[in-house]
Image (cartoon, helix red, strand yellow):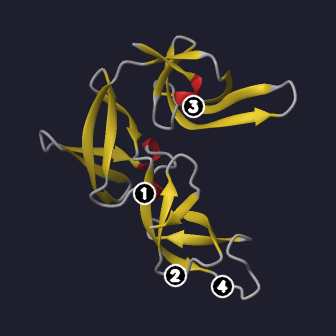
Amino acid sequence: MAKVLATEIRAGNLIEWDKRVWRVLKAYHVHVGGRGGAFMQVEMKDIESGTKKNERIRTEDKIERAFVDQREMQYLYNDGDSYVFMDKESFEQLNLPADFLEGQTGYLLPNTDVQVNFHNDRPIGVQLPPSVTLTVMETEPNLKSATATGSFKPAKTETGLTVMVPQFVMDGARIKVNTDTGEYIERG
């Protein structure tokens, strides 16, 4: 097991906290002005019991990463309530239920390469690439008075994910989305 700085924690990582293994669902850096100091706000889920927990971890703290077997896999397709992945070495297929992927399904397109983490030969988490390129299927029309840097509007992507995008983004546009935060990065 290796210790990492709290600022290196990402969604999909596995960490040991309170003698249990947790999967990180969300992790973001928070800095309050004044004397507060910076910290990481981490939302995590116990892989055994399924309970969720929010923790504030000081940025200088070191966190124990759980030992996991990381396998490169490719997302193939959605089969009702489960998502099918293929191991890129053995070509074996793995079905994961939608609730296991909690909030990550909106970033999955067929043939997307992901990393599936196993703990004691059991799948316990999927780590997405840092960003994905999605197609906007439906968004509000452009406002003539809106500036390029001004306001944002909701846009629904091909995977069903809703992303806040700048006014100039139209239906059919390809956009790059951060998989950690769900925020628009740029046109893809």
Q: Quadrant of residue 43?
A: top right
Q: Nearer the viewer, residue 111 or 30?
A: 30
> What residue does disc 4 label?
142
Q: Secondary structure at mark 1?
A: strand
Q: Which mark is residue 44?
A: 3
Residue type, label 3: Met
Q: Which mark is residue 132?
A: 1
Q: Quadrant of the C terminus?
A: bottom left
As measured in the structure, the alpha-carbon distance from the residue carrying label 1 to the one carrying label 2 is 17 Å
As measured in the structure, the alpha-carbon distance from the residue carrying label 4 to the one carrying label 3 is 38 Å
Q: Secondary structure at mark 2?
A: loop
Residue type, label 1: Val
| Tag 2–tag 4 contact (CB < 8 Å) | no
Q: Position of residue 13 (x, y in %)?
A: 46, 31
Which is nearer the N-term, disc 4 or disc 3? 3
Residue type, label 4: Asn
Which is nearer the N-term, disc 1 or disc 3? 3
Q: Which mark is residue 171?
A: 2
Residue type, label 2: Asp
Q: Is residue 53 left or right of residue 2?
A: right
- Is the residue marked by circle 1 packed among few (<14), some (14-19), or many (20+) residues within 10 Å? some
Judged by depth in the image, the label closer to the viewer, 1 or 3, is 1
